[in-house]
Image (spheres, helix red, strand yellow):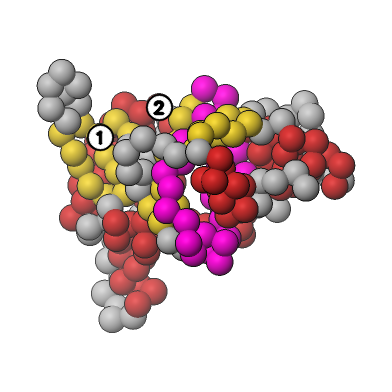
Amino acid sequence: MTTRNYNQNCPIARGLDVLGERWTLLILRELVGGARRYGDLRAALPGIATNLLAERLNELQDAGVVDRTDLPAPIGRTVYTLSDVGWQRVLPILQSIAWFGLDRLDPIDEAAVVTPLNGFLAGILLGCDPVSAAGVDATCRVDIDGRRFEFAVNYGRLAAAKGEPAVTITARAADLVTARLGASEAKRKAALRRISFAGDPQAIDQVRSVFSLSPG
């Protein structure tokens, strides 16, 4: 399979040489939530051929935006993560695309099936305020409908998780999406009140502020 190359000395073309292939941005989307095994990625991307996933991961490693780590025994498994370059340069691209697509989602209502990933993207990732995060250094864990996402707030930006979480957020995906997209202020506030926090009280207050998760 041939990787597309635009052969143009243009920053947009050079960026698309790395990120413009089919499935690439969705693979990176999955890695925003923390370390993932190959099988996790296959399960989250059911339409991708296994050889294509392997090829894309190799390309992203070569580009320096994904790291592969072979964990020692007794775990003995391979996991993929965003590299520090990936967090710094790719995450803003994913956030911009998510903002662009947010109002193109199917209508959200009480009966709608909302995935944990959409809950994380809409409720957490897109709520990040870099100004509020400027003085915050905390690792967060978010448990959404049985799926776990981990990351850190690192002095104004999001980064890879470091050690045990200072804050754990537990929520339904539907509540996280409703907190952002609810049809009324009353619905948004009710959804926010159903989101639970555990951990260091100061860190909880900071994280609530960074992601606009205080019911007011």
- Could you tell me residue 162's position as x and y percent? 32, 43
Q: Residue 43 carries which label?
A: 2
- Could you tell me residue 25's position as x and y percent? 41, 51
Q: Which residue is drawn at 16% across and 23% down?
A: 76
* Residue 125 colored in magenta in the image: yes
Q: Which residue type does callout 1 highlight? A: Val
Which residue bears the numbered disc 1?
79
Q: Residues within 10 Å of mark 1 (few under 14, many from 20)?
A: some
Residue at disc 1, secondary structure: strand
Residue range of the region highlighted in magenta in the rendering: 118-146
What is the C-alpha distance between the residues marked 2 and 1?
14 Å
- Could you tell me residue 39's position as x and y percent? 31, 26
Residue 107 seen in the figure = no
Q: Which residue type does callout 2 highlight? A: Ala
Q: In this view, does 107 lie to the left or right of 195?
A: right
Relative to the observer, which residue lies in front, 193 or 3? 193
Q: Is residue 94 left or right of residue 161?
A: right
Q: Quadrant of residue 97?
A: bottom right
Q: Residue at x 46, y 30 (%)?
A: 148
Q: Which residue is drawn at 58% across and 54% down?
A: 210
Relative to the observer, which residue lies in front, 70 or 62? 70
